[in-house]
Structures are given as structure tokens and as C-alpha cells.
Amino acid sequence: MPVLNETHNPDLRSWVSSANSPETDFPIQNLPFAEFRRKYTGESFRGGVAIGDQVLDLAAAQTIFSGKAAFGASACAESTLNTFMSMGSSVWSALRLALSRALREGAKEQSELEHCLIAQSDVEFSLPCTIGDYTDFYTSVFHATRVGSLFRPDNPLLPNYKWVPIGYHGRSSSIDVSGQTFKRPQGQVKAADAAEPSVGPCKRLDYELEVGIYIGEGNAPGEPIALDDSDQHVFGYCLFNDWSARDIQAWEYQPLGPFLAKNFASTVSPWIVTNEALLPYRTEFKRDAADPQPLPYLSSDTNSEEGALDIKLEVLLQTQQMRTHNEPPAKLSESNFVYSYWTVAQMVAHHTVNGCNLRPGDFFGSGTQSGPEHEQGGSMLELSRGGKESVSLPNGEQRTFVEDGDTVVMRGYCEKEGVARIGFGEVVSTVLPANN
Ligand code: CA
């Protein structure tokens, strides 16, 4: 398991002055990876690292590194990060350490690297890697219980929930990077009082506030990843908006789970915050003594002591009208990944316990991360109590679900005493009207 090291030192400062601002998501202790290019150029996408309000172009900077760091940096020059992610945690750590040293105040590399910086405001992003398989979990017991009570009032939480990290295999083709726009999905729905279903535009379009998890090094078929080995396989994290069509979902989801309600659009934030950068924000994984305790393959001292992650999450909404009047997005809710009923290590161990092989670039959604309070709901379905109560926005508009022209913004960051604050940036996506 990776350990706290000099790259996490909260006193480090960078010669990139914007990285020293207390508000930045991207201080020198973060160093997240993305695939980017200059806007309007048609250049090739290549790997970059965020530092303050700049991107360090790793294709341009790779010549300054040596050893394992050089090996990693040359892979980051590719148009996806899959090769770098496949190289494993010793290469990821070597490049992180080399970047940290080269970007520190007083580093001898400054004069060379200054030419490899591009303002983030001048770049556009692609997906950071080719996502092979996408699995969506369901790890907030609060979300599962509230949504369950809407779909099955007499039986909200199914008996397997507290034993098995529930998930389903999703579809990667419609996952796109922040800035995604998509047409309101159409599909088959059936109102409770209707004799037959009908087809038409979704009327209950929703977002889901999730954490995304990127797998780096994979495992061979038939060789499960043990709980305490998951750190060698988890490359990093992002914010993830898993768009959902609740009316389509309600009609189609039994008996095999979500299908067309979930595969029309999902949006990731551009930066992958590495597993190593998040180490200071690991925290205790607690399971209520009254609940079933995890089976042995999902239980270890390390997982109990530091399996959970303290990531603060928030959702904001900007309507078309707010955009027209230049009003900022309004906050809908706040939550935290620490409420997750299962840890990422448990998701990895469970996903592979049957011998399933994960591959570099595979992606997990955490499931909607709702907190214990109603106000901490990570979906509109929860905040509007199934569409029964509208949510009031500061400009007087009301929402029960997401309307055409609405932009949903999700942000995430980690903050605690004695540790550098690090952030995820944001994930933004906008709903367009359905086809006629
Ligand atoms: Ca989901």
C-alpha cells in the first residue's frame, strides 16, 4: 500500500504561483492527470498534469525525467492514459515524485518547464483514457433506502444489500468528458394507472452525484484482487454524473436491472485525482454493529482503519433562465463519499472474487452518494421526494426533475486540518431538448 511521503507535505510550495493559492483545487500536493489540447487547434490530445491554473504538458516535458518517471512520462505523451495506467503503482509514484520535485519552489527544472505550461482556460479535454468496461455500484445505503422506498414502498432495502456490494454492468460508449451535452432521452414508460406503456421523451430526467474510479493495472482472469491489494490496481478518482431517466427506469428495471434508463449519457470530470494524492484523506470504515459484518474477503484491518475516503461533494444547477441573466449555478445539495456503505477496496475485491478480470481504463461508478439527511440527497428523485415536492431555486424557478437547457455542475474537494486542500475541479453537462 502506498504511504504518505514528501509529495504530501502541506508546506510544499510551487514556482507556479497560482498553485499556492489557498482556494486552488490543484496545489502541488494534488498533481492530477488529464488528456488535453489547446482549444481550436486540432492538435493531438496528450497527457497533462494540473498545477494551479495551468496544465503541464507531459509530451513537451518528458525529456526532463529519468528512470521510471521517464518511462511513465513518455506513456503520458500518448492520446490516452491507458498505457501509463497499466504500468502500475511504482511508475505512477515515481512520476508523481519527479513532478513534485520539479514543480517546487527553487527547482532547477523551472526554466525548462515554464515553456511546457498552458493556461487551463486555453485548453479542452478528452476522456482521459479509453474506458473499456464500466460498472456502476450502488454504495450509498441512504440513496438505496430512499429510492427503494419510492419504487417499492413496502420493501425498500432488499435483503442482499448489506452483504453484497450491489452493481450492474453499464455501457461505456455514452460516457463523455465535462462539457457534454445530450438530447433528452426517449423511451418506453408506463404510468401506474395506464393500461399499457407508451413511448416518448423522458419526463423524469435526473442526475446522480457519484465518484468515478479508474482501474490502472488489471488482473488476470481467474486471479481475484485481494482486498488489501486494491491500491496496486486503483489509479485514481473523478467526479461522475450518471444521468438517469427515472420513468424509463421504473418500467424496465425488473428483473434484470437498469438498461436504457442509464446508458444515454454519463459525464466525468476531466482530471483523475490519483489514489496516492488522496492518501491523507483516507479514514476509518465503520459498519454499524447491528448490521451484518462484511464477509472475510471484504474485511481487513487496513480496510477498517483507512478504507474510506473523505471527499466533500456538491451538486449545483444552472437553468437556461439563470444563464440568460448571468446568475451563477445554485447549490442543490452537499454530501460526502465517506457515507459510502462499501469502500473502493471492497468494490474491487468483490468485482474480481469470481475471477472476473479488470483491465487498465476500466471504470467504476460509486453509485449515487447521498448522505443520511434528506437535504444530502445526490439525485433530484430524492430531493423532490419522487417528484412530489418541488425544489425552489434562488430566482424563483422550481424543479422536480431536470428540464431542457438545465446545466448540472458537480464539484468535489478534500479539506482537513494540517493537510493541503485538494480538489477535483468540476463536471458540467447540459440537457438539450429531445428529437421531435
Ligand atoms: Ca448510477
Image (cartoon, rainbow, N blue to C red):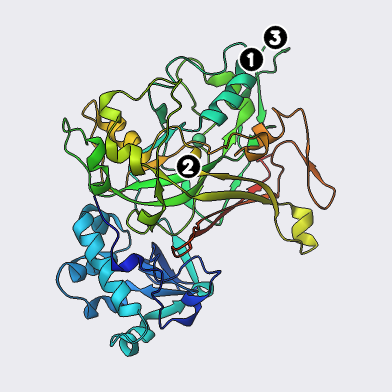
Which residue is labeled 2 in the image?
338
Q: In this view, does 341 lie above or below 289?
A: below
Residue at the spot x=50%, y=74% of the render? Answer: 53
Residue 126 quadrant = bottom left
Q: Mark 3 points at which residue?
A: 195
Q: Which amino acid does label 3 sit on?
A: Ala
Name which of mark 2 and mark 1 comes first in the sequence. 1
Residue at far bottom of view? 111
Q: Is residue 128 visible?
A: no
Query: Residue type at mark 1?
Result: Pro
The 10 Å Cα crowd at callout 3, few under 14, some 14 to 19, many 20 or more, is few
Horizontal and vertical percent position of residue 22: 53, 71
Residue that carries the numbered disc 1 in the rendered image: 153
In whole angstroms, how far apart are the C-alphas of marks 1 and 3?
Answer: 21 Å
Given the image, on which type of amino acid does mark 2 rest?
A: Val
* Mark 3, secondary structure of its residue: loop
Please state the horizontal and vertical placement of residue 344, each as a whole percent of the image.
36, 40
